[in-house]
Amino acid sequence: MADRKIDRFDKYMEYKGLNDNKVTLDLGISVGTIGKSRKEGRDLSDKSIELILNKYQDLDKIWLLAGEGNMLRDNFSYSIKDESKEMPPRKLIPFYDDVSSIGGTNMIANMESVSSASDYIDTGDWFKDATAAIRHYGESMIEYPSGCIIAIKEVLDKRLIIPGRDYVIETSEFRVTKKVQLMKDCIRAHSTNLEKYEDGTLIHQPFDIPFKLIEHISLVLGYVVKKNGGTVVFSNKNN
């Protein structure tokens, strides 16, 4: 039997076909709240439990709090099974339209704090692990059209950063999208646009960002862009 309330709620989420983003949307809580509850020594807060029980009224309170009895209240068991078959879960991620990443530090990205999503995007099967979506501007990363929406997955443990992958790196001064190289005490941020000045010097030169100055870092999973005529193009970095 699971010892923590979050472990039991995970079992309920699996049974109902729910994911973190759907629960976040249903409960109106901050992005990452559910994920942080799974960390060692953490659990669901009293406020989260109250919201969960109010929203998912088929979930048995005693089972969630103490692990005793059945997961579902008796009078809900049949209807929930039918509902889960008829309505497969949607993959919704928060889209922060007023948050942007840039290709180079010669541009200015909006660094004001953001408290709520502008909208939610249904990513379907394209970006299953995405935790958010933001705008990208600039020309230094040639694979991302300026103005496109990039799907990202926040990395909470910097030891899990993968060299050679693209990340959105945020400090107190700027937010950039770059291909990363791991150094001893920093990340070396590389551009993929290798355009040069007449003397042969790279226009978009690599630069170092000390680990201690990185406030947030997210893996880029891919991008979405609307072409002329309204065609929506998806590009998944894992494909």
Image: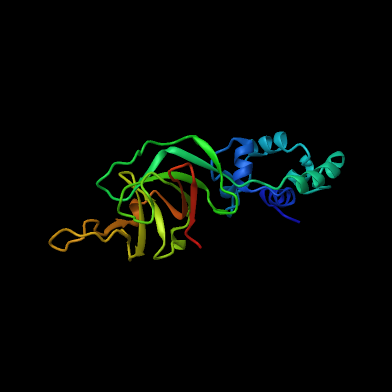
Residue in the picture at 72% in, 55% down: 2
The spot of residue 202 in percent (x, y) is 21, 60
In the rendered view, would you say 197 is above or below 58? Answer: below
Nearer to the camera, 3 or 77: 77
Nearer to the camera, 57 or 200: 200
Q: Residue at the far front: name it.
A: 229
Q: Residue at the far left: name it.
A: 199
Nearer to the camera, 100 or 8: 100
Horizontal side, residue 219 vs residue 193: left or right: right
Horizontal side, residue 119 vs residue 214: left or right: right
Residue in the picture at 76% in, 45% down: 86
Residue in the picture at 52% in, 48% down: 131
The spot of residue 89 in percent (x, y) is 67, 47
Nearer to the camera, 44 or 129: 129
The spot of residue 66 in percent (x, y) is 76, 46
Q: Quadrant of residue 29?
A: top right
Q: Quadrant of residue 228?
A: top left
Residue in the picture at 38% in, 42% down: 100
- Total numbered labels placed on residues in the image: 0
Q: Quadrant of the N terminus?
A: bottom right
In the rendered view, would you say 16 is above or below 236? Answer: above
The spot of residue 222 in percent (x, y) is 47, 54
Horizontal side, residue 99 vs residue 104: left or right: right
